[in-house]
Amino acid sequence: MKIAMIGTGYVGLVSGACFAEFGVSVVCIDKDRNKISDLKKGKIPIYEKNLEEIVKKNAENGRLSFSTDYKENIPAADIVFIAVGTPSRHGDGYADLSYVYSAAKEIAENLKGYTVIVDKSTVPVGTARKVKRIIKETNPDADFDVASNPEFLREGSAINDFVRPDRVVLGVETKRAEKLLKELYRPLYIRETPMVITDLESAELIKYASNSFLAVKISFINEIANLCERTGGNIKDISTGMGLDKRIGSKFLHAGPGYGGSCFPKDVSALVKTFHDNGMTGRIVESVIQVNNSQKSKMVAKIELALGGSVYNKKIAVLGLTFKPETDDMRDAPSLTIIPALVSNGALVYAADPEGMEEAAKVLKGVSYENDPYKVCENADGIVLITEWNEYRALNLKKLKKVMKGDVFIDLRNIYSHEIMKNAGFRYFCVGTPEKTQEWD
Ligand code: NAD
């Protein structure tokens, strides 16, 4: 079997490499010439654990190749995946589908023999049908089916998620397409991974509903955390107590600075737009966006209060910039809201991140970067931990306290405790415990 993966970003590259690992012949196609040229030299454009080894191994054994050329590669493909970006359209919150449609058109121009064209990108309900129309209009003689196979991998554990998913969702219209896709996913089928076979619309909606539901959990626990700060109660204990209920589950119940990343913000917004386009209001998802935006702003206020009411001329050391650990992805990271607000209020921001500094430097201006967490904290008035990298979970707190000027540690991920921090000489602020509120009072 031969497959082509259009778009060689987080999803396309990981999926392409993993399919090659399954034994399939894969060509990853991207419009970005530099990316393809780097990949041909074995240079991986993103940080993702174990990806480099898998890419290298499969490129060497000839199962994985890279190209910018549709014409050369699409005719031979049995299955073509569309894994291009679907970012938020500027200003209005709709998913920008221009990359998907342009890929569909170029695929259509080069089809030869029966081919299944699969949306792997996260796309609003109805997109697969639109892709089908584009292909038919561009190439009326084409022999093809469309399918929807949304991807659920998480950056930071993408390879593991891809090869050990909770489920594979296949939205199909014909038995022929279903058979081919099941054949491709056979290695997972053998491992008894549940396969959810649906129509196109259900598959598209499963992805949006899943991401939005996880965003609901995060915003819900953040609201309870904010309540705790007023009423007393410890959000970590509350999350544990709630999460042990199997109907609720413990995942995505961690209070923090609000969700970010390449998926949740844009996907929740796009779902809101889908409700609107259908004459409805998605009241829960609309609230989720409001709660999340206000959570990020609250973090700025929290930092200012912890530093005595103003950050003007204060040196703030930030630990962690990426939207979550184990990725270099800065898209919609909470740091992108928090840090510019601090800078514009006169703070002198110094930041560290194990993998994200290069990406961060492209989008966060007025910040000094320094990789070593102890160096970045030298003479700082306060430390703000934004991303819970493992490197920051076991810091030498005595050493940290010694190098800084002030004594404020603001932990936006609740990875330390009041007791530990107090013993190390810090005034400790986190999310969702009353002690912090008392500090402010
Ligand atoms: P990305 O921005 O990292 O990569 C997209 C790639 O597509 C880029 O390299 C771009 O150059 C390429 N591209 C754009 N138009 C093209 C075209 N016409 N032909 C060939 N290449 C083209 O995006 P991503 O993070 O991999 O996300 C891809 C899709 O998968 C999105 O819809 C996203 O919502 C979804 N998704 C992402 C994740 C994630 O964790 N990143 C997880 C699940 C689903």
Image (spheres, rainbow, N blue to C red):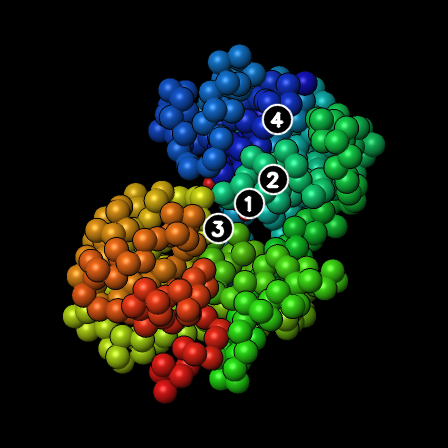
Check contact, mark 1 vs mark 2: CB within 8 A: yes
What whole-number distance in Å separates the C-alpha atoms at marks 1 and 2? 7 Å
Q: Is residue 207 left or right of residue 232?
A: right
For this orientation, the residue located farthest to the top is 61
* Kind of residue at badge 2: Asp
Which mark, residue 49? none
Which mark, residue 154? 1
Q: Secondary structure at mark 1?
A: loop
Label 4 packing within 10 angstroms: few (<14), some (14-19), many (20+): many
Q: Does ligand 1 reach within 8 Å of label 4's beta carbon?
A: no
* Kind of residue at badge 3: Ser
| Residue 17 in which image quadrant | top right
Would residue 259 be seen by someone viewing this image from the given angle? yes
* Kind of residue at badge 1: Arg
Q: Earlier in the sequence, mark 3 or mark 1?
A: 1
Name the mark nearer the viewer: 4 or 2: 2
Would residue 331 be seen by someone viewing this image from the given angle? no
Name the mark nearer the viewer: 4 or 1: 1
Q: Nearer the viewer, residue 384 or 205?
A: 384
Which mark, residue 161? 2
Against 301, residue 360 (above or below) is above
Which mark, residue 19? 4
In the picture of the structure, the residue carrying the numbered disc 3 is 262
